[in-house]
Every structure is written in structure tokens, then in C-alpha cells.
Image (cartoon, grey):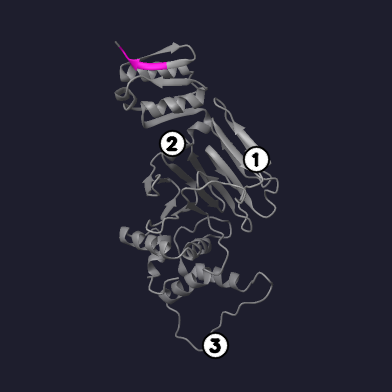
Amino acid sequence: MSDTFDWRILDRHLASDASPDDERALAAWLADDPRNAEVVSAARAAAHGSDGRLEPRWNVDRAWSRVAARMHEAHDGSVVSLHPRRSVRPWTRRSRTRLLVLAVGALTAAALLLVVVVRRPATHGPGSAIASRTHEVLAARAQQTRVTLGDGTRIVLNAGSRLRYSDDFGRRSRDVELDGEAYFDVVHDEARPFRVHARGSIAEDVGTRFVVRAYSDQAAVEVVVTQGSVVLRPERPFTAPMVLVAGQRGRVAPDGAITLVNEEDVERWLEWTRGGIVLEGVTLGDAAVELGRRFDARIEVAGEDLARRTVSARFHNEPLPRVLDALGAALGARWTRIGDRIVIARSE
């Protein structure tokens, strides 16, 4: 870990007082050494009270008292000394922040932290974490599936999605593989992190709620956090990681580039779990794919110009004909059934 890092930046970050320059410096520091993410995780854990809630304001003195107590409890039952061999000057707030960050790096994080490691290209073969796939949960087209795993984690699979996990899930590790879209409400287990493998990425969770959208026909993997905090870390060394908090979305492009978006309406990413359909600024071509999964229909758009038209609409438990009528009225288009296909074309 770097000795030149200004630890006051982490202090301001945890207190939500960080400037844009602070956040950029923090991101660069996280990219410098994978262990630095563990430091941030444990520091955030120290900022939480005994009830698991984040303190209204990050307080170094309060957090240090918690970390000091935890440092006395080694995993093997031994005691870790906190007293230096030589006398030192009285601690200032800055020196306590420095020592706090160094100390928490040796502790197991208990914060609400999600680490996403992007690996492209990659496949889950025999040597992967889910090599033995003895359980598979499917959400067929036009269906949704809800499942509660043995650890209590609740998952909602969207239409056309697949979840796999091995028969030893929960014994030593908690790994699942996702193809499609799912909402995860994960039960925290510090000893066994929950990991979601999706299209070459690994999402490691420690007690939070989030959506992973990773259909094979979409260009990028998207992670939307509804509760907790996230570090989105690419494997590409020249791309800095992103720190996400609840209400933010991280998007990983095929070339490994990461973008972060603040979502004013994060609930729209959960609307599908309640029977809704949200088409927000998508092309009609992409909307046709989404509606095809939702209603188990083959929907085509005639003409590239029409397929590139942008649509924004929301529906709740509406049948497909009514959805298509609404889209057609907005775009000056019409739809017809031709055999087993639905074709959307410009109105004559």
C-alpha cells in the first residue's frame, strides 16, 4: 500500500465531504494495489454502528475505538498488541486517521461493500468457481422466478434468465453464475462472501442489494446498487476502479471502459420485479428484444431508421397488444402479425 497517499482523502470520502479531485485521487489509489479496496471496506465497516447503520457523520475517534477493540481479537484467539515499543507523540486526528487506515487493512471487512472484478474474455470452464453445476434455476421467456438460497439470500430472476450454483453452495463459498438479469438481496456472511459470476465479471457482495443485468445480447454489463456501496474494479490495469454508492449504476463496456451514472430514479431498475416494464431512452430495436423476452414473442422492426428511434415509456401489467399500440402511436408506426412474428413498420 502506498505510503504517500493522503489519508485525509479517505476521511473526507467516508464523511461524504470529498471533492471531485479527492474522488479521483482515491480511485487512482485503489487501482494502485488490490489490497487498498480492503482498507476502504474495513474503514467503512468501522464507521457503522453496532446496529449496522452508517453513522450520520464519519468520526475518526469513534471508528478508531471500534477498530482498536477488534484488533485485540485475533482469529486464533491470541492478542494483538496496540502499544508501540517506543514512545510516540500524542495522537492527533490526522495520526489516528493514518493508523486507523493501516490497522483496518489487516481486518476482515464487515462493511456494505460489493467488489466487481471484470475479466474479458473469460468463460467458466471446469476450473471455475462453479465447475460443478448441479443446480440450475430458470426463468423462461414471459416468466419470472423467485428463489431463496440455503443461506437466506433472496433472488428474483427476470424473463429469459438462468442462475447456476453447485451442490456445495454455502459450505465453503457462495458462488452463483448468472446469464440474464437478477435482483439480489444478499444475507451477509463475513466468512463466506457472496459472488455473482456474469459474462466474465465477478460481483462480490457483503450484505447489500443490487441488480445485475448481463444478457448475452446486450453490449455491456450493468450493476445497479440499491443499498450498500460498490467498488467496480476492472482487470485492465490502465482503467481506474469506480466507487459506487446506493443510487448509482456502473456500466462496463466490451473494451473494459467503466462509466458511472447517478440514478435519480433507482426504483425503475426494480420495476420489472413488480410486473412493470420500463423503456427509458432505449431504441425501438432494443425495446423489441426486451418485449420479446417479456412476452415470449418474436418481434421485428422493419427498417434501420425506425429501429434506431428512441422510445421512453412505462407499462404495468399491460398486455402486449396494448404496449405495441402505445409505441406505434408515439412513433407513427403500426404492428402486424405475420405467422409467428410481430412486425413493427412505419405507418403508410
Residue topped by disc 1: 148
**In this view of the protein, which residue sits in the foreground, 296 or 271?**
296
Label located before the other in sequence (2 or 1): 1
Residue 22 colored in magenta in the image: no
The segment highlighted magenta reads 343-347
Instruction: Name the outermost residue toward the bottom.
Output: 86
- Asked whether the residues under the numbered discs 3 and 2 touch, taking CB atoms below 8 Å apart as contact, a structural biologist would say no
Q: Position of residue 301 (x, y in %)?
A: 38, 21
Report the quarter where the C terminus lies: top left
- Residue plotted at (53% across, 60% down): 48
Left or right: 186, with 23 as reference point: right
The CA distance from mark 3 to mark 1 is 52 Å
Residue topped by disc 3: 85
For badge 2, the amino acid type reads Gln
Left or right: 244, with 24 as reference point: right
- Residue plotted at (54% across, 25% down): 142
Label located before the other in sequence (3 or 1): 3
For badge 1, the amino acid type reads Thr
Q: Tell me, yes or no, if residue 53 can be seen here.
A: yes
Q: Position of residue 327 (x, y in %)?
A: 37, 20
Left or right: 193, with 263 as reference point: right
Mark 2 is surrounded, within 10 Å at the Cα level, by few (under 14), some (14 to 19) or many (20 or more) other residues, namely some
